[in-house]
Amino acid sequence: MQDNTDREELHIVMFSGGASSSYVGKWVADKYNKENVVLFFTDTLWEDKDNYRFLEECADYIGLEITKVRDGRTPEEVFFENKFLGNARFAQCSEELKVKQTLIYIEEVRLQGYEPILYFGIGPKEKHRAESLKSHYEHFPLEPVECRFPMIESMSQEPKARAIIENEWGIELPRMYKKQFHHANCAGRCVRGGHHHYANLYRVWPQRYRAQEEMEENFRKKFNMDVSIMKKQGKPYTLKEHREKVLEEMTEEELFHYSQQRDEEEYIPCFCSFS
Ligand code: SF4
């Protein structure tokens, strides 16, 4: 068996579509031989089209192709196949479309003789996430994988990634940033989002909210289960109820303020927000 010290390092940047991971991508590409740097993106097929544009423009600026992997299913297809509606407590879409795809890729590059090292765009304010990622990649691949967090470990100050990308790289940020989404994955439809997050989706893209509501209603009907993406006081609370009882009752101004509050209780950050 090959010892991992014999393997050539492969620097894999977890390129999520966010500003921080793009900034880290450039930092890694400048530091190492570009031939051994990968911009790795796991595609759920649910991302907002402008996130794809942003990813491509950042990759062009960095001077590398994006390595895209896809399971081929959307989160919705995963829910229906597994007969389990993803929610804030357990989102198997993240497990199957992101985490599993990453583990498969890690094992593939090892078989090709490389030692993978993963890089994340996580800043000092999110050190707890760095710890949980380290622990995850120590235990779940066949052999532990080293995780690096340049914005915590190697930079003297957290860079203003968004401003640098916009002003120095000349790349417009993903429109979801400007539309005040705190979690810009899966086009605002993330099942980890809570009451306020979904209020923002309703405010910004009501049709997309309706599509998510319809998916939830179809799921409930098809499997005859009283389940929902969100909860209220520990009980199922559907997007339909949320729209009819709360969101539609608000003025535009109230909706805006409500949508900008954080979902501390409901929102549990997942791998998707940095993978
Ligand atoms: S961002 Fe949310 S909906 Fe999308 S794959 Fe991750 S957990 Fe699932």
Image: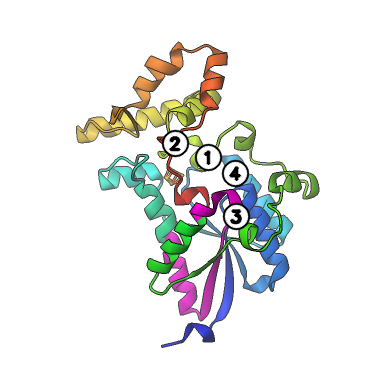
**Residue position for label 1:** 183
**Residue position for label 2:** 193
- Identify which residue, 38 or 159, lies in the foreground: 159
Residue depth check, mark 4 versus mark 1: number of the one nearer the observer:
1
On the question of residue 104 being in view, the answer is: yes
Query: Label 1 crowding class (10 Å Cα cut-off): few <14, some 14-19, many 20+?
Result: many
Residue located 61% across and 31% down the image: 179
- Identify which residue, 193 or 203, lies in the foreground: 193
Which secondary structure lies at badge 1?
loop
Query: Label 4 crowding class (10 Å Cα cut-off): few <14, some 14-19, many 20+?
Result: many
Pointer 4 residue Cβ closer than 8 Å to ligand 1: no
Pointer 1 residue Cβ closer than 8 Å to ligand 1: yes
Question: What separation in Å lies between label 1 and label 3 (alpha carbons)?
Answer: 14 Å
Badge 2 or badge 1: first in the primary sequence:
1
Pointer 2 residue Cβ closer than 8 Å to ligand 1: yes
Span colored in magenta: 101-129
Label 2 with label 1: CB-CB less than 8 Å: yes
**Residue position for label 4:** 51
